[in-house]
Every structure is written in structure tokens, then in C-alpha cells.
Image (cartoon, rainbow, N blue to C red):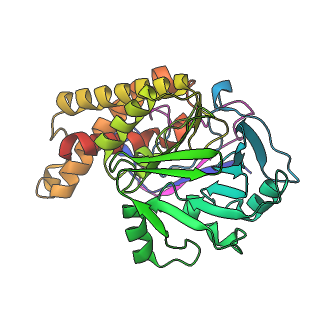
Amino acid sequence: MPHIIRTLSACAILLLGISCTDNPGLETRDSIAAPGEAGRPFPNAPEIAPIGVRIDKYLDLPDGAKGPGLDPKKGYRTEKLGRDLYMVTDNSYQSMFMVYETGVVVVDAPPTYATKLNEAIAEVTKLPITHIVYSHSHADHIGGTGSLDLSHNPVIVAHDETKMLLARDADPARPVPTVTFQNTYSLEVGSHVLKLSYHGNGHEPGNIFIDAPEQETLMVVDVVFPGWMPFRRLAVSQDIPGWLSQVEKIEKLPFKKLVTGHVTRLGTREDVKTQIEFDDDLKAVVGEALKSNAYVDGINPADMGNTWALVDDYTARVAVQCVTTLTRKWKSRLGGFDTFVWDNCYAMEQSLRVD
């Protein structure tokens, strides 16, 4: 039996140069891609498959996207960042905790390993959790808070905007913060301090910077992706110009270790510079594509009265140019390049047209 890799309706992606047929059907191939190969596109399609088209093999990860391995029995690893400060990760999500003289401060509790976070802390100390800091409101980063040991009624610190969002959501897994701030807040516990600051709506309202100055560690979640393509739609950011400016702000801050909330390893200043370079390329390529593609070009005359069809066709042509151009430089530099390059081209196109 030939291996079925994709289901396509007739003329579904004609824009990409794929031939139409009279009868919808299944595209087949004699064998799946061999190890080490990327998913092979259909004839005349861009090298990177578009959104919604399943492939049989993603691009291999470059070395720069890889981090230390996990003990599969534990499902997480703990990395010391400096005096009494630790990162916990499952190599997909990241959180931190800080031990001080009489307790523990936890920064974020992703639900993917929140039940294990208590174990990670217990490996270091028997002191109770006295404080929790929320980087922002999203459930994938703090939705495990309810699984922590909350027996000592910890103080929960977050930005004002985060409190408003969580009060609206009324999610028992994400208790509403008990202490909030607008611009800056210094969390002083024993001989340690965490400096919290807000720099506006980038990823979402309330997404804060968490600085551990003694440990030369900065935590900013969902803004930088060390060694990786940014998550889809530029990290589903509400304010893309604000998000881009926050990446540049991070590069100027004094840190040596960057906890980003995602992917396989700590970030460095070079990682931030690399993302700025990619962001700049993405913005420039999309800007050029918006100018060089006519708004109406080759569309069926019967669709001229369909406003959404005109927009869809124009932005699709812009995205194709964006993906094709970026692939030449970035496909072997960023982990997961082929997963979200289409999403990010579309997100930048939308931002440049309307923001």
C-alpha cells in the first residue's frame, strides 16, 4: 500500500502551483521520508509546506536548538542559576524557584509538570512555598498553580492587568493574585530580591520582566525563543510592534542567563541578537512583498465582488514570497523553522498593514 500523507480537495492550493484535478482524492507516495529528511513538498509548491498541510517529516533541529536531556523517569530537570535560584523545565516549558531563609518563591507553574514542581523543590529544600510570581495570565504558564503545595497560603504577586484578566476568567487552577503593581515591584525575601517590572502590552497585557540581579538572571516569558523560530503568530502577541520592541529592550539589559518560559535551554545575549536579526528580516521581507505584489493579480473575475477573496489572495501571495525568501537564510538556523514560518509571515503582514 502506498503511504498516504495528505488529503487535498481539488484545486485546494492552486495558488502554490499544485495542479487541479476533476476529482478530489488522496495524494499518495510510495514511502515516507527517510530519517534526517524534511517532509517533501508537492511539485511546484514552496519548499516549506503551508499551514494546514500535514507532512511526514519536519526539518531536523539544528544544534543551537538543542538543550540538555531529561531523565525520562522524572520528566523534568533542575538547573541551578546562581545562589539559591533554580530553573525547572520539561524541555518545553520553564519556571523558576528561589530559596530564601524561611521559604520558597515560585515563578510560574506550567501545568505540564506542575505536579512534579513540588518534587523539584523538595530535592533542594524542605521549606514551604511562601510566594508565587505570575509572569502573565496565560494558563499554559500558570495553570498548574493549583497543583502546588499551597498549605502555607502563599502571597501571589502579579501585574494589575494580570489580576483583572484572572478575575474575569475565574479559573480555580489560577488563583487571583493577592499583591499587584503597575510599573515596578521589588520582592524582597530574606537575603534575596526579585525585581519585577512592566514594559507595556507586547505578548499580552501584564506580561512582566523578572530580574534576579545577584544571579544575573532575567526571566521574560513568550518574547524570546532561544535557538528556535518564535511560536506561531509571533507568540500570539496582542501588540506585535510592542513585542518586537521588548525583544530589543531585553538585549540592552544586564543579564547572563535568560529564562524564556519555553524550549530546551537557557537563553543568552547572542540568542536575543539572533532573534532581533530574524525579526528584522521578517519585517523587511514582508514589507517588500506588500509593495511588490499588486493587490489584484490573476484572480477569477467572478470573485471581484468578494472582498474577503481579494484580501485572501493578496495576503497569500505576500506570504509565499515571505516564506520563500526567509527559507534560504533561516531554515537551518532556527529550530522548528518549518512549523511556524507561515504563521509568522501572516502575522507580520497583518501587523504592517493595520498596526
Residue 187 drawn in magenta: no
Q: Nearer the viewer, residue 264 or 315?
A: 264
Q: Quick one: quadrant of the C terminus?
A: top left
Q: How far from the left and from the top, in percent, is residue 42? A: 51, 38
Per the picture, the main secondary structure of the magenta-coloured stretch is: loop
Q: Is residue 349 left or right of residue 192?
A: left
Residue 177 horizontal/vertical position (percent): 49, 68
> Can residue 98 be seen at all in this image of the molecule?
yes
Task: Give whichever of 139, 127 is nearer the camera.
Answer: 127
Q: What residue appears at the point 47 percent right and 23 percent down from the top-left corner?
A: 273
- Residue located 33% across and 51% down the image: 201
Residue farthest toward the left in the current orientation of the protein? 305
Q: Which residues are magenta?
A: 19-48
Question: Which residue is painted at 57% across and 67% down in the image?
Answer: 155
**In the rendering, at what x and y percent does residue 27 appear?**
56, 49
Q: Is residue 22 magenta?
A: yes
Q: Position of residue 44 (x, y in %)?
A: 44, 32
